[in-house]
Image: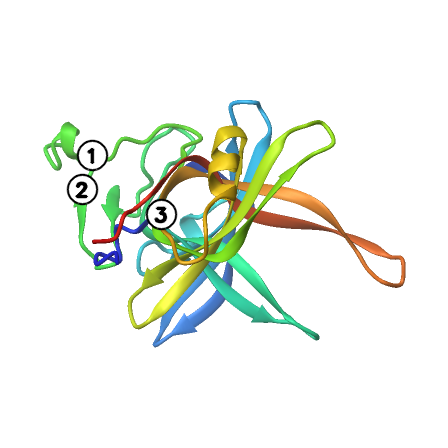
């Protein structure tokens, strides 16, 4: 079982702030602000990824639509209770943040790369050395998960003969909590995942993607919704000792 809860779920994204941050919740005077980050795929289409940032990392006034932002953290889930059933919500929970101004420079909120401990280092002259600074590129979208299959994977073939598999991964967190991350893969990875079973320990690399779909209701009405999932580029099964 993974022992380091900071390393079994690592997400790194960079893109454009898409909307104004709004207060999501507060704990002991610490505010957590939600907003979306717009990230371009190599195909040119866009993923709109939800993020949560503590006001102890950065004052929300610096999170301005149109600014470039880098976030390193974890892809987390939580259940929101609706009128009839709960819904799984997913977001990137920030541990480190860098925000840039219109000139491409780190904003004045200290020109620092902070983590949730409150520690940071200055981007100013001499601190840190260039090789110690995080490597940040536009439209970064990377995720690594080390967890367990918690729902039987579903393998299917589309009418266009495309092979797809869906699976749900449970990633452990401190205090006996877990994040439940939907994942999707294609081709050879789909065939491989289709043979997996509940409880298997897997390591996954990929990217976070957003996807619109139409939800149809019994009364004939429909609603366009957005799903978030990990698009798998690589997966391996960990043999338990």
Point out the frontmost of discs 2 and 1.
1
Residue topped by disc 2: 122
Q: Quadrant of the C terminus?
A: bottom left
Query: Closer to the N terminus: mark 2 or mark 1?
Result: 2
Q: From the image, which quarter does the N terminus lie in?
A: bottom left
Q: How would you rate the neighbour count of disc 1 (Cα within 10 Å): few for under 14, some for 14-19, many for 20 or more?
A: some
Give residue 144's quadrant in the image: top left
Measure the alpha-carbon separation of dots 3 and 2: 37 Å
Q: Which mark is residue 133?
A: 1
Query: Badge 3 local density, few (<14 within 10 Å), some, or many (20+)?
Result: some
Q: Nearer the viewer, mark 3 or mark 2?
A: 3
How many numbered circles are shown? Answer: 3
Label annotation for residue 202: 3
For the residue labelled by badge 3, is the local secondary structure a helix, a strand or a loop?
A: strand
Q: Residue at x 46, y 69 (%)?
A: 25
In the displayed structure image, the side of residue 211 where residue 55 appears, left or right: left
Give the image location of residue 112, x and y in percent: 24, 44
Residue 118's x, y, as percent? Answer: 21, 58
Q: Distance of mark 2 from mark 1, alpha carbons? A: 10 Å
Q: CA distance from mark 3 to mark 1?
A: 31 Å
Pick the front one: 88 or 111: 88
Please tell me whether mark 1 sits on a helix, a strand or a loop: loop
Mark 3 or 1, nearer chain start? 1
Q: Position of residue 37 (x, y in %)?
A: 50, 43
Q: Which residue is at the front of the view, 178 or 60?
A: 178
Q: Residue at x 30, y 72 (%)?
A: 175
Question: In this rendering, does residue 68 appear at all?
Answer: no
């Amino acid at each position: 079982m993974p022992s380091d809860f900071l390393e079994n779920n690592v997400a790194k994204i960079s893109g454009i702030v898409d909307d104004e941050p709004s207060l999501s919740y507060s704990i002991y005077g610490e505010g957590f602000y939600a907003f979306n980050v717009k990230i371009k795929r190599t195909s040119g289409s866009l993923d709109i990824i939800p993020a949560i940032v503590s006001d102890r990392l950065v004052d929300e006034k610096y999170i301005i639509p149109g600014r470039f932002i880098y976030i390193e953290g974890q892809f987390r889930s939580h259940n929101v209770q609706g009128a009839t059933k709960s819904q799984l919500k997913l977001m990137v929970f920030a541990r480190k943040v860098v925000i840039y101004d219109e000139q491409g420079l780190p904003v004045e909120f200290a020109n620092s790369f902070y983590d949730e401990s409150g520690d940071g280092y200055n981007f100013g002259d001499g601190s840190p050395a260039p090789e110690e600074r995080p490597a940040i590129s536009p439209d970064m979208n990377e995720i690594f998960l080390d967890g367990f299959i918690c729902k039987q994977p579903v393998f299917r073939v589309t009418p266009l003969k495309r092979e797809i598999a869906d699976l749900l991964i449970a990633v452990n967190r401190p205090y006996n909590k877990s994040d439940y991350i939907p994942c999707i893969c294609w081709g050879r990875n789909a065939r491989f995942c289709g043979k997996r079973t509940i409880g298997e320990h897997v390591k996954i690399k990929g990217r976070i993607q957003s996807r619109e779909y139409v939800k149809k209701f019994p009364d004939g009405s429909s609603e366009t919704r957005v799903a978030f999932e990990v698009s798998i580029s690589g997966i391996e099964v960990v043999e338990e000792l």
